[in-house]
Amino acid sequence: MNSEYLIVSKTIVPDYYEKVIQVRELLRSGKVKEVSEAVKIIGISRSTYYKYKDHIFRTSEGDLGKKAVLSMMLAHEKGVLGRVLNSLSEYGANIITISQNPPIGNRASVIITMDITTLISDISSVISGLEKIDGVENPTLIDVE
């Protein structure tokens, strides 16, 4: 298996990994508005949060990874989004939502939420595949549930 992602028991990793997730959940729930407030409540530094926030995810209880959120920049050219969607479909992903901002500087940011239950490969392969598509920049995994 050649993947960037591992599933590891939280009992063997530093406690601040779990705290990073707790900060993100506080922010997502709206209980706090700012990162500085959330990290103070949870008890980690802002730098620890920012260092790990895009790299630590929680799996759903009982099911391993059903939804994933990807972010990317797309060239404002005919067919780029279609090629992205076709690629995701070929990997077995089912699109739930697409959010695309108006193009600025001939590029548009896109966020795609997808069901990955039937993925035929791992998520890092999906991201690698997206990187190879002309007009796609910086495909990034934002979250996994």
Image: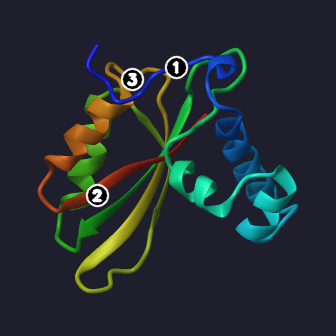
**In front here: 97 or 24?**
24
What is the spatial separation of the Cα atoms under label 3 and label 1, in whole angstroms? 17 Å
- In the image, 16: left or right of 113? right
Using a 10 Å C-alpha cutoff, classify the residue at mark 2 as few (fewer than 14 neighbours), some (14 to 19) or many (20 or more). Answer: few
Residue designated by label 1: 7
Residue designated by label 3: 119
The residue positioned 55% from the left and 35% from the top of the image is: 67
* Kind of residue at disc 2: Asn
Residue designated by label 2: 138
* Kind of residue at disc 1: Ile
Q: Position of residue 86 (x, y in %)?
A: 25, 42
* Kind of residue at disc 3: Leu
- In the image, 123: left or right of 145? left
Q: Quadrant of residue 36?
A: bottom right
Q: Earlier in the sequence, mark 2 or mark 3?
A: 3
Q: Is residue 89 visible?
A: no
What is the spatial separation of the Cα atoms under label 2 and label 3, in whole angstroms? 21 Å
Using a 10 Å C-alpha cutoff, classify the residue at mark 3 as few (fewer than 14 neighbours), some (14 to 19) or many (20 or more). Answer: some
Q: Is residue 130 above or below residue 49?
A: above
**In front here: 104 or 47?**
47
Q: Position of residue 21 (x, y in %)?
A: 69, 43
Q: Quadrant of residue 6?
A: top left
What is the spatial separation of the Cα atoms under label 1 and label 2, in whole angstroms? 24 Å
**In front here: 89 or 112?**
112
The residue positioned 34% from the left and 30% from the top of the image is: 4
Instruction: Kindly report which numbered mark, 3 or 1, lies closer to the viewer in this rendering.
Output: 1
